[in-house]
Image (tube, grey):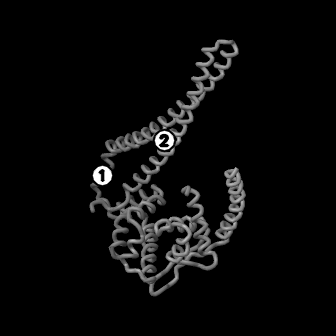
Amino acid sequence: MSRDAFIGELRHRMAGLPQQTVERTVEYYSELIADSVEDGLTEEEAVSRLGSLDEIVASVVKDTPLTQIVETRIQERKKKGSSGWVIALLILGAPVWLPVLIAALAVAFALFVALWAVVIALWAVVAAVILTGLAALVAGVVELCRLHLPQGLVLLGGGLVCLGLCALLYLLMKLLTVGTVKLCRWLWVSVKSLFVGKKGK
Amino acid sequence: MDVQMKRGLLDVCVLAAIQSEDSYGYQIIKDIKPYVDVSESTLYPILRRLEEGRLLTVRSVEHNGRLRKYYHITDAGKARIEDFKRDWDEMEKIYRFITKEGKQ
């Protein structure tokens, strides 16, 4: 890809980000290409060394707050000059789209809470198994002291099984929790990406 | 390497690259690359973060009929490097403890 094609595509994909962010990013990458070319690389080599456009745009989106992205989108609309009809429809349609918007946000929030509720519930299970294990061990010792040999051994064995199980469950839960955090972060960046880039192409 | 740890290390590496004299994006990458795996797209957010944290300042200088951004380290940036060196002494002590335990 040539320098101009790269910069053009970069601009295209960053549409919707604040103007200042777009300019700064374009300046940074065109300077790198120019310096690479001065260092003896061809334009194509210089561009290919920059990595994929997806990665570049994703890292810029990650560093831009959602509020800024939405603000830019709204200002763009204003610049295009919404016709009186659109504004009238927006106001008249408010009883329809406003509840729908609120409902959509509520559903998204509920899903988020539900996701974490499952994680918390599973941690509670781990805690319960630990407590059961400890309780069984104590009961086992008590039973042994009262010379109820079979009951005591069963309780001790059960307790140890519970604690062993916990060690495994703990590792699984750690993976699951880290995974959920990553999933939430990824979803957040995806939501922001929805507002960035021109549609159709 | 741990992501958080690498992020902190890269910040200090970039500061170190502009410590003795002001430098620009392409040169910084060239200077750091033999030591740490850094790409053009990873350097960009680092430079932005360091600028926002006032650890470095940026100025544009004319070069071959175009503008090139030079990065200049601030006192806070130099202090950050000193902090890192101090942390490193501590890390080394811990490292010696860990490897000594491993041998026994």
Question: Who is closer to the viewer here, A90 or B62?
Answer: B62
Quarter of the rendering containing residue A200:
bottom left
- Residue located 29% across and 57% down the image: A84
Camera-side mark, 1 or 2: 2
Q: Along the line of sight, which residue is nearer the eye, A151 or B36? A: A151
Left or right of residue A72: residue A88: left
Q: Position of residue A81 (x, y in %)?
A: 32, 62
Give the class, few, some or many, for how many residues have Cα within 10 Å of label 1's Cα (few <14, many ≥20).
Answer: few
What residue sits 39% from the left and 56% below the top? Answer: A193
Residue visible at 45% across and 41% down?
A112
Residue type, mark 1 in image: Ala
How many angstroms separate mark 1 from mark 2 (CA)? 48 Å
User: What residue sits 44% from the left and 74% below the top?
Assistant: A27
User: What's under tag 2, amino acid-wise?
Assistant: Leu
Residue A133, position in %: x, y? 59, 26
Q: Quadrant of the N terminus of chain A?
A: bottom left
Q: State the quadrant of the C terminus of chain A.
A: bottom left
Q: Chain of mark 1?
A: A
Q: Residue furthest bottom?
A: B64
Q: Nearer the viewer, residue A128 or A74?
A: A128
Numbered badge on residue A176: 2
Q: Is residue A3 visible?
A: no
Callout 2: helix, strand or loop?
helix
Q: Which chain is home to disc 2?
A: A
Q: Position of residue A191 (x, y in %)?
A: 40, 52
Near mark 2 (Cα within 10 A), the count class, few <14, some 14-19 or many ≥20, is some
First reached walking from the N terminus: tag 1 or tag 2: 1
Across and down, in percent, residue B81 comes to 66, 68
Q: Is residue A154 above or below residue B23?
A: above
Q: Which residue is mark 1?
A: A88
